Amino acid sequence: MKEISLEELKQIEYDILLSIDNFCQDNNLIYYLWGGTLLGAVRHHGFIPWDDDIDVVMPRKDYEIFIRKYNTPIYGVYSSETNKNYPYIFAKAFDKRTRKIEPIRYSNQFSIGVDVDIFPLDAYDNNKSYPRLVRNRRIMLDLWRWSITEPSKIKSLHDIGKNILIYSLKTLSNQLSRRINDLSRNIDSNDKIMLSADSNIDEPLIFSKNWFGNGIKLIFENHEFICPIEYDKVLWKCYGNYMELPPKEKRVPHHTSVIMWKEGA
């Protein structure tokens, strides 16, 4: 198998994004560029020079249609709802011709391929049940993080106990992932939405629904994609002064995976 270069990786991710955009238009689904991809569209009109991934968000109802129906000869999608072995909280649209070997700590050795992360946006319920949701989500998220951790070398009794916990949870990563999503799925709200299926945040991010709306088209590389209509407010909430570049030492690619073309691709 031939290893995929960084420039090839970005092109494959971009092609997946084009496919997602086409699929959503054909099926009347809503999506928005998200995270560093949204920031890249606004600040760089494309990839952040040192970034190497693409993120998208969708309202929950559109997300669930997408994960059930999106499939092409080249691209597919994995989610905890549609694949019992899939360990992550959010979905990934991926290129079937590629294979990505994740760092060992994300084990279960679930090999996907070059992918685009897709997060659901859920309604936010501003009442007494919300603190309970946050608490339960944090418990589930902590357990999920343990479930995808690689056991450590045994140097003490503490390591033995830690490894027993990890092995006990490994078979539950998919169930924990689905449970975290279930905590947010059935909430009803007219004016606020939240991002709760991101494993990198301890508490859900809450936004005004009006910040997203029907979206606005912005250039990312050579094509227009849908972004939150109030993208400035979204980016300020997520990053603060997002137009200020980070220090040079932080301008480094994220991925640590080994990415290959499959035989015959």
Image: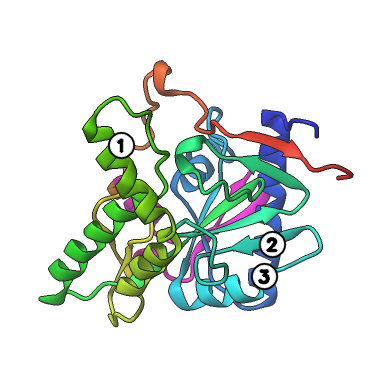
Task: Tell how many labels.
Answer: 3
In the image as oriented, which residue stretches furthest toward the top? 249
| Range of magenta residues | 211-236
Q: Which mark is residue 241?
A: 1
Q: Which of marks 2 and 3 is nearer the N terminus?
A: 3
Q: In this view, does 122 lie to the left or right of 65?
A: left
> Can I make out residue 210 in this image?
no
> In which quadrant will I find the C terminus?
top right
Task: Say which residue label 3 marks.
Answer: 70
Contact, mark 1 vs mark 3 (Cβ under 8 Å): no
Q: How far apart are marks 1 and 3 (CA)?
A: 36 Å
Amino acid on which disc 1 is placed: Asn
Q: Does the magenta stretch include residue 139?
A: no
Contact, mark 1 vs mark 2 (Cβ under 8 Å): no
Decide: is 41 above or below 5. Answer: below
Q: Is residue 212 magenta?
A: yes
Q: In this view, does 54 lie to the left or right of 146?
A: right
Percent of width and height locating residue 220: 61, 46
Residue 156 image-quadrant placement: top left
Q: Distance between the residues labelled 1 and 2?
A: 36 Å
